[in-house]
């Protein structure tokens, strides 16, 4: 599982020109599900995401988590995070999760986030979407379940 996490002052996702989800201060997260992912991995990723201390405290140091600031989440599914570009010029997506299982795990991760975050909005799995955001910092972090201990 891969998360591309951006600290935002606001973000929204549109489908066919209509706003599907929007947030204020918090995190916009692109979520990629791989072939080997499962609920245990999703739990580990959600815990890391919500606990990341990437918001500034009163001294400007990154000491606060999403929970600490009462921030919001916008979670967008994006299978292209599993693009394999090692050979040729056309990306391969053989490492991305099968659509039905990827959708189930994406929805599972969103549901787990909703247990701990006051507002969690989403895009629509498999839809063409337009994502807008104001990245603060800019501050962007990439989490890969293969690189997270525990």
Image (tube, rainbow, N blue to C red):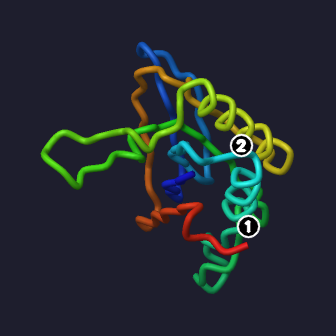
Screen quadrant of the C terminus: bottom right
Q: Residue at x 55, y 70 (%)?
A: 147
How many numbered badges does the structure rendering display? 2
Which residue ends up furthest to the top in the rendered image? Answer: 16
Q: Residue at x 76, y 53 (%)?
A: 40
Secondary structure under the numbered disc 1 in the rendered image: helix
**Residue that label 1 marks:** 51
Above or below residue 109? Residue 125 is above
Label 1 to label 2, Cα distance in Å?
15 Å
Q: Which mark is residue 147?
A: none
Q: Is residue 143 left or right of residue 40?
A: left
**Which residue is at the front of the view, 106 or 96?**
96
Q: Position of residue 56 (x, y in %)?
A: 61, 75
Q: Classify residue 49 by image quadrant.
A: bottom right
Q: Classify residue 67 by image quadrant.
A: bottom right
Q: Residue at x 18, y 39 (%)?
A: 90
**How many neighbours does mark 1 have within 10 angstroms: few (below 14), some (14-19), or many (20 or more)?**
some
Above or below residue 63? Residue 38 is above
**How many neighbours does mark 2 have within 10 angstroms: few (below 14), some (14-19), or many (20 or more)?**
many
Q: Is residue 98 left or right of residue 52?
A: left
Q: Position of residue 85 (x, y in %)?
A: 24, 50
Q: Position of residue 118 (x, y in %)?
A: 80, 45
Q: Position of residue 108 (x, y in %)?
A: 74, 37
**Residue that label 2 marks:** 109
Q: Classify residue 103 by image quadrant.
A: top right
**Which residue is at the front of the view, 150 or 31?**
150
Mark 1 / mark 2, whichever is N-terminal: 1
């Amino acid at each position: 599982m891969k998360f591309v996490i951006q600290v935002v002052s606001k973000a929204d996702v549109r489908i066919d020109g209509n706003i599907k989800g929007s947030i204020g201060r918090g995190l916009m997260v692109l979520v990629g599900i791989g072939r080997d992912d499962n609920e245990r991995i999703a739990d580990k990723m959600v815990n890391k995401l919500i606990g990341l201390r990437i918001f500034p405290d009163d001294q400007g140091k990154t000491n606060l988590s999403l929970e600490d600031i009462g921030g919001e989440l916008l979670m967008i599914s994006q299978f292209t995070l599993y693009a394999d570009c090692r050979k040729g010029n056309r990306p391969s997506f053989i490492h991305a999760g099968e659509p039905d299982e990827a959708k189930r795990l994406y929805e599972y991760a969103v549901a787990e986030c909703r247990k701990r975050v006051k507002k969690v909005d989403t895009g629509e799995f498999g839809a063409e979407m337009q994502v807008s955001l104001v990245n603060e910092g800019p501050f962007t972090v990439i989490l890969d379940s293969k690189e997270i201990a525990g």
